[in-house]
Amino acid sequence: MVRIGNYSKSYNHRLVLQVPALELETGIYWLKGENGSGKTTFLKSVAGLLPFEGTIAVQGVSIKKNPINYRQLVSYAEAEPLYPTFLTGDDLLKFYRQTRKADSSQINTLAEALGVSNYSQHKIGAYSSGMAKKLSLVLAFTGAPKLILLDEPFITLDDHSQQILTNLIADVAQQGITFIISSHQPFEALLPVALAVANQTITPQPALC
Ligand SMILES: Nc1ncnc2c1ncn2[C@@H]1O[C@H](COP(=O)(O)OP(=O)(O)OP(=O)(O)O)[C@@H](O)[C@H]1O
């Protein structure tokens, strides 16, 4: 599903992460690692938001050779999303609906589920961090991505919303969508495969620890 070869990423000539080879089948993956170990760097690389050395392909589509098709396959939600404050949530939902070729009913269902429809008509500048986070999650699920990357999706969400998000991930994963999720909070209920980010590399873990 995801194939990574000879990946490496440095900032200012300082190596942060090196992954000689990694293949992920369809499933839910939990990126686990200490602060600064490279989780966000990896997610942003796979999302196509950071330059890197090496190859990354999703369903055989290369991020470097075929970036437009690649981006249709992959969604990414940032840990701390920032949007232009003068836009409303509805503006962004509409933009994503058009660019991701999603239908309105999908967006409405997602926005209802996470409670975003209660405030999406207001300007983003007036949102709390949790409200912006929920909007970013709705956007990440919009359309028909095959791989959804979620960076710390549970932070700033209240308990109820965390449960709704957990159920949503489980439902979508059942449709064959792959998730790579970085989190310092456990989410064992989703039975994720752990990927340890440590010592400047990523190593699949045989079982949750
Ligand atoms: N733009 C940047 N320029 C220089 N160094 C960076 C940059 N972004 C990240 N780094 C460095 O890369 C390393 C990995 O950072 P990254 O944000 O990927 O870690 P993380 O595992 O997501 O951390 P956290 O759990 O705190 O979110 C850190 O040493 C960080 O200082």
Image (cartoon, rainbow, N blue to C red):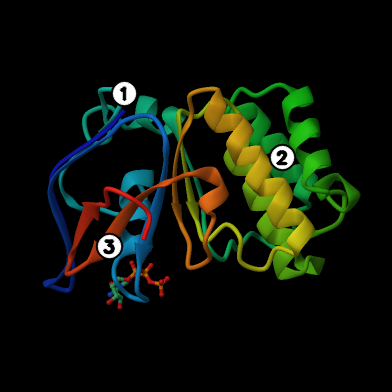
- 24 vs 10, left or right, is right
Mark 3 close to ligand 1, CB under 8 Å = yes
**CA neighbours of label 3 inside 10 A, class few (<14), some (14 to 19), many (20+):** many
Marker count (numbered): 3
Of the four image quadrants, the one with ligand 1 is bottom left
Image quarter of the N terminus: top left
Of tags 1 and 3, the one toward the viewer is 3
Of tags 3 and 2, the one toward the viewer is 3
- 189 vs 2, left or right, is right
> Which amino acid lies under the numbered mark 2 shown in the image of this protein?
Leu
> Which amino acid lies under the numbered mark 3 shown in the image of this protein?
Val
User: Which residue lies at the image location 27% right of the left edge and 62% below the top edge?
Assistant: 197
> Which amino acid lies under the numbered mark 1 shown in the image of this protein?
Gln
Q: Picture coordinates of residue 68 (x, y %)?
A: 37, 29
Q: Picture coordinates of residue 115 (x, y %)?
A: 83, 49
Residue indicated by mark 1: 59
Q: Secondary structure at mark 2?
A: helix
Q: Secondary structure at mark 1?
A: loop
Nearer the observer, 208 or 48: 208
